[in-house]
Amino acid sequence: MAAKTSVRLTDHLVRLGTSIFEGVPRPAIILLGALMAVLLVAPWLVNDYLLTVLIVVLYFAFTGQAWNIMMGFAGQLSLGHAIYAGLGAYIAAALFTRFGIAPWLGFLAGIPVTAACGATIGFLAFRFHVAGVYFAILTIAFAEFARIGFDHLDFVNASAGLFLPVAQYAHNDLWHLRGNPTMFYYVILAATALAFVLCRALLKSRVGYFWLAIREDEQAARAVGIDTFRYKMAAVVISAVVTSFAGVFYAFFYNNLFPEQVFNISRSIEMILGPIVGGIGTLFGPILGAFVLTGLAETLNTALGALGLDFPGAKQVFYGICLLLVVVALPEGVWPWLARRVGVGERRQ
Amino acid sequence: MSALLSLQRVSKRFRGLQAVDAVSFEVSVGELLAIIGPNGAGKTTLFNMIAGAIAPDAGSISFAGEPIGGLPADAICRRGIGRTFQIVRPFPALTVEDNVVVGALLHSRDVGKARGRARELLRRLDLFDQRNRTAATLTLPDRKRLEVARALATEPKLLLLDEVMAGLRPTESDRMVATLRTLNRDSGLTIVLIEHVMRAVMALASSVLVLDHGTAIAQGKPEAIVRDPAVVQSYLGADAV
């Protein structure tokens, strides 16, 4: 009986596993497999500094993927995604420092809060037809409310900041997310891979088609019977909850949280640069974008240092110029262009 | 047999313009009604009110015996009214096939099944060979056909077609007429179409409604309508009568 059940379960998992890759061109599977293999062994190949850089890359790949659900799929521009990461971070960190609750449980506890936050913003916007740039402004406003609110919330030390105990653990404690960078690296790698699989599954499902229809032409979407309010709400809530996990990771990796930093609009902008550079609405764009941007920043650091051009602000200026060039040369993003070159051909969905 | 669609004194005003003025008519199951009239007669406004894109100021609209006036467009589509837009609105970045899949997903939770249904419709509307192109790259007549396919994918009981023949060559227009007739005959699909191409109207419509300046000035069999003095006057001016 139990054997039979386990066989059926295995069957189910195999079918799920193959269905994830259904319709993916063979070169894409090979490239993805190769990338995953390299990333899996990376901690043995690179030094501690580069490993930290890779953690940052994967962090932005993850948040970019989460933001892309809203903008790339459903066409709703959020410029306030820091609010979801910030809420996730603060809830998990506060539960850990105050009550010793493990971050995984803290993440679960935060889900209703971030979902409700996304639903509130979504409801106000979609119910009262706040769209386009006005919607973007609304998302910024909410992130600002959160920043000011948390600056005065004594439960999480207000503007003085919330600190997690940075004890040197003899071993990695995955349950409490206390350990060395290698452990954090694998956590964010797994999360990014999961987010990728989740986004692909969503995109290939009924809700994914409805999102694309809404993004392309909302009135036409309604004319084919799509309850656009409901599906836009779903996009905001899913995107918010996925983003909140990045916040939990951030809190436990950096061990300190300040409202001024966590909810700052520049956090929101950082999240969306990856998908914009990589390719909005594509699955691999946010990942490639994160690599390109962090790679660019690191290269600039080294290059400007070597050239003796490390005056204050030099990095930002050159970074800005490079971004400008990428966006002008490849307005669809780097990935759709590269995908055509390598014959993978993931169009903008 | 009660009417599938019934409008009672439906009106819509845009500021100073009375676009539609107390228009009443009924469409019974299986009928093919053509709405004709000069530019600005209020045909598209009437369509937009039936399809829920805009709400009427006055009057009542009922479909299958239930009032639908003022319901949102998506709710009306789910009740069984499909439509095309006069100024076409396909989902431009999606492939031709995916455009139709979106429509088919209204009544199917399974993407594979919806895709099967979409391909069937694309064959019917001569778009199968173009199914992998993005909708934005199609010619205007093809985009009109795509809109028909997408609307049909939602399995409507009533199909509203807003000038789908415009821009088609006579042979293409004949083919579209044949397709619509087949749909009407085989599945009992009721069709209301706005049309300027009289060749298509005469070949297709079982009855014709004529609008002028927002009011219905005549309704009847196509052969009778084209001889109606009021209709001739509205199209050609008083001297022609």
Image: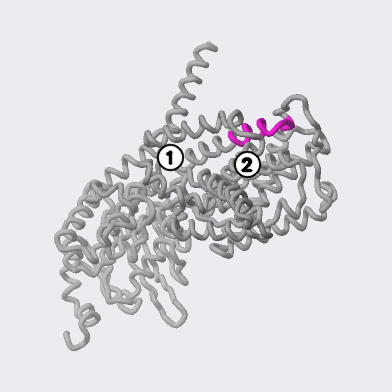
- Specify the subunit that label 1 lies on: B
Is residue B173 left or right of A290 when viewed as pictured? left
Task: Tell me, yes or no, if residue A258 can be seen here.
Answer: yes
Residue ID at (63%, 57%) = A309
Task: Assign the N terminus of chain B to one quadrant of the image.
Answer: bottom left
* Residue A70 image point, x, y percent: 54, 51
* Residue A188 image point, x, y percent: 62, 36
The local crowd at label 2, few if under 14, some if 14 to 19, many if 20 or more residues have their Cα within 10 Å, is some
* Residue A312 image point, x, y percent: 68, 60
Pointer 2 residue: A53
Amino acid type of the residue that numbered disc 1 sits on in the rendered structure: Arg
Q: Nearer the viewer, residue B34 or A212?
A: A212
Quadrant in which residue B166 is drawn: bottom left
Pointer 1 residue: B109
Q: Which residues are magenta?
A: A176-189
- Specify the subunit that label 2 lies on: A
Residue ID at (52%, 16%) = A6
